[in-house]
Image: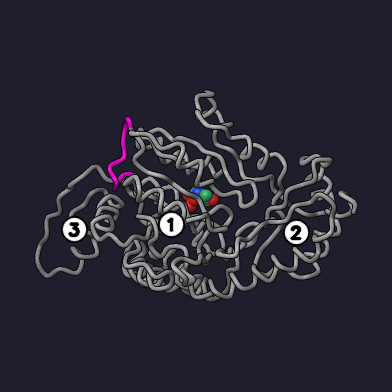
Amino acid sequence: MIPIALPLLGDDEAEAAREAVLSGWVSQGPQVAAFERDFAALVGAPYACAVSNCTTALHLALAALDIGPGDEVITASHSFIATANCVRYCGATPIFVDIDPDTYNIDPNRVAEAITSRTRAIIVVHQMGMPCDLAALVTIADRHGIALIEDAACAAGSQIRMNGGWDRIGKPHGRIACFSFHPRKVITTGEGGMLTTSDPELDRKFRLLRQHGMSVPDTVRHGSPQVIFEDYLAVGFNYRMTDIQAAVGRKQLAKLPDIVGRRRAIASRYAELLGNIEGLSLPFEPEWARSNWQSYCVRLPSRADQRTVMQKMLDQGIATRRGIMCSHREPPYADGKHRHDLRRSELAQDQSILLPIYAQMTEGDQVRVATSLRAYLGR
Ligand SMILES: *Cc1c(COP(=O)(O)O)cnc(C)c1O
């Protein structure tokens, strides 16, 4: 069986988890602080704050910006549902706009058209690890004085050319970027998330809200020779990462450049193997973007039925997934009230499939995937 994804975890991570367990401090503590420093240094962010997953990171991003009822947040429907759900958690309204059909990323023109006097934030997604058009989106957000949040759940290790140089996603371009360390992403801590920003006040709010609004974290109380009484300054949450996860995350982070290098090689081999199948569209990487290839998405020829292709491949021991979902088609959002045309998002969901990709994937496995797809689609 060729799986859709497989984390690259080994003895390094197992040993790090063991050491964290035996250290006597297993919840948010010194390993979390070290993971934050490592992550901030790698992506080039002044501040990084670790949390329990990317969904909670997105929620904290909106909460720290005081987004609430009556506010509109422009985002993509064509994303994992957590992107929309975090807006609802705050009582605000997600305003879905369509994507660019080639990159599957939010279309900056559609974002500009959707701005109203109620728009408080824009959540852009680096879908499947492919950077979205940040230069255009930052310009739009700045022009209107609206906060730009990057849902970078899939984009650890992706790069974008900004102002002439290559930056890692997470270096602050918008106000806040949010990452996931779920096993479906390129590096994992089992569950985990991270927020980066250049704004010390936002970082302070993330830290307050991730642990119950507590004025003094337990690490400080624990190390203090004086008795300290803490206050609870806001209605916060328990969105902490554990030191066991962070210890694993530090090992994963050290491997990130290697993992991304391998995935880029796999993506270019797929491009060779699948290049000449009539009507099959391969992923498009703009010249200003370097994807980490979290997913490899192909658009099927119109003659092919998505479910049938996926079933044929599964029968041959190859797992695939359909294209990225559209939130506006799911019950919590399917009230038909969305204002903007989302046809490109719907077509992308219905016509695309994700092929297996993981760092340790062999050339033989890739040939099997390509042969299977080719056998069904023909030349
Ligand atoms: C995976 C994902 C999330 C959610 O991440 P979790 O860490 O699982 O909460 C959010 N947005 C996008 C685009 C994702 O792919």
Amino acid at pointer 3: Val
In the rendered image, residue 173, in percent from the top left (x then y), is placed at 39, 60
Cα separation, mark 2 vs mark 1, equals 27 Å
Is the residue under label 1 in contact with that under label 2 (CB below 8 Å)? no
Q: Quadrant of the N terminus?
A: bottom right
Amino acid at pointer 1: Gly
Say which residue label 3 marks.
216
Mark sitting earlier along the chain (3/1)? 1
Mark sitting earlier along the chain (2/1)? 2
Say which residue label 2 marks.
2
10 Å neighbourhood of mark 1: few (<14), some, or many (≥20)? Answer: many
Q: Which residues are magenta?
A: 62-70
Classify mark 1 as within 8 Å of ligand 1 or not, answering yes or no.
yes
Amino acid at pointer 2: Ile
Cα separation, mark 3 vs mark 2, equals 48 Å
In the rendered image, residue 80, in percent from the top left (x then y), is placed at 54, 44
**Residue at x 12% of width, y 55% of height:** 229
* Numbered label attached to residue 193: 1
* Residue 17 in the figure: left or right of residue 279: left
